[in-house]
Amino acid sequence: MLESDDFVTAESLDYWRFEKFMRRARLLLNTFQQFRTMCEMAIAEEKAARAAAATGFTATA
């Protein structure tokens, strides 16, 4: 835990508590990764749509 620029607190965890913490951390990181992937895909699709609109080409899916 970072409480300030000058002070850090540490806590010792039993193995099962650490595993629970790591499961939650992995889930959170995976959620952020999925969100990032979705955003990158949406940006790429928007760029493609704008490029197609600029050239007068309409794509159908």
Image: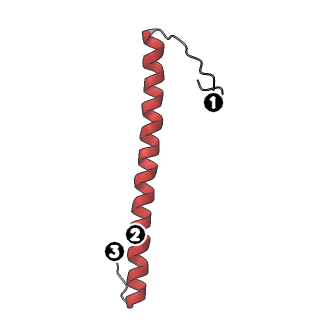
- Please say if 27 is above or below 32: above
- The answer to whether the residue labelled 2 contacts the one labelled 3, judged by CB atoms less than 8 Å apart, is no
Circle 3 residue: 61
Q: In which quarter of the image is residue 26?
A: top left
Under circle 3, the secondary element is loop
- The answer to whether the residue labelled 2 contacts the one labelled 1, judged by CB atoms less than 8 Å apart, is no
Residue sitting nearer the eye, 7 or 1 = 7
Q: Is residue 46 left or right of residue 60?
A: right
Q: Quadrant of residue 55?
A: bottom left
Mark 1 or 3, nearer chain start: 1
Under circle 1, the secondary element is loop
Q: Which of marks 2 and 3 is in front?
A: 2
x and y percent of residue 30 in the render?
41, 39
Instruction: In the displayed orientation, state which residue is furthest to the front.
Output: 6
Q: Which amino acid does label 2 sit on?
A: Glu
Circle 1 residue: 5
x and y percent of residue 15 in the render?
42, 10
Q: Which amino acid does label 3 sit on?
A: Ala
Q: Quadrant of the N terminus?
A: top right
Q: Quadrant of the C terminus?
A: bottom left
Mark 2 or 3, nearer chain start: 2
Q: Which amino acid does label 1 sit on?
A: Asp
Label for residue 37?
A: none
Circle 2 residue: 45
Mark 2 or 1, nearer chain start: 1
Q: Is residue 3 left or right of residue 20?
A: right
Q: Which of marks 1 and 3 is in front?
A: 1
Under circle 2, the secondary element is helix
- Please say if 52 is above or below 12: below
- Please say if 40 is above or below 17: below
Q: Residue at image x 42%, y 47%?
A: 34
